[in-house]
Amino acid sequence: MAVAVDAVAALFSLVMAVGAPLFDSQVVLPLSLYPAPLVDVYRWFVAEFDNYIVADRPPFFRGLVWLDLAFLWPVSLANLYGILARRRWSATTSLMAGVHMLTYLSAMFGEMLGSGRATPKLLGLYVLFLVFAVASVARGLCSRSAQATPAAGPSPVLAAPKKRV
């Protein structure tokens, strides 16, 4: 189970590490900065999923995208490295990325469900990111609790000092 959660968290981090600078940034930066094929993918995505939020670019969404670029993108890069290199601290970066995405998605779902404009296909796309976020939070919490439980006696910090003869 832990391997599956690691794989989902790594996939989420990979998607965000690649998607944030190439795709999400097109929401807040001029499209003239991007090569035509990348802009075509952006426009295809908007049309294919009828993503009115990305198309309309409301101020709250632009703010979320800037937050993604400033916070989630570097955390996703670190998390991907940490998971692949099996670093203990990657539990913390997974938790950070997952909580950030859950916060982001709460605003997105609030808008989509409140406006009544979201298509089932668009909601399905964001539900997928919800699964990624929950898996990342679970990985962060479960990994941290496993690290906190001593498996073979007391931790060296808590152990009584040994007498020297």
Image (spheres, helix red, strand yellow):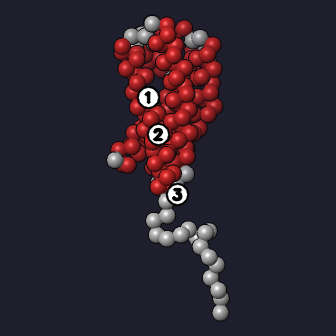
Residue picked out by circle 3? 148
Residue picked out by circle 1? 130
Residue picked out by circle 2? 136
Q: Nearer the viewer, mark 3 or mark 2?
A: 3
> Is residue 40 visible in this depiction of the protein?
no
Left/right of residue 65 with respect to residue 134 in the rendered view: right
**Label 1: few (<14), some (14–19) or many (≥20) C-alpha neighbours in 10 Å:** some
Toward the viewer: 99 or 18?
99
> Is residue 136 visible in this depiction of the protein?
yes
Toward the viewer: 47 or 98?
98
Give amino acid for label 3: Ala
Q: Quadrant of the C terminus?
A: bottom right
Query: x, y percentage for residue 126?
Result: 43, 22
Which residue is depicted at the point 49% across and 71% down?
153
Which residue is depicted at the point 56% across and 68% down?
155
| Dot 3 or dot 2, earlier in sequence | 2
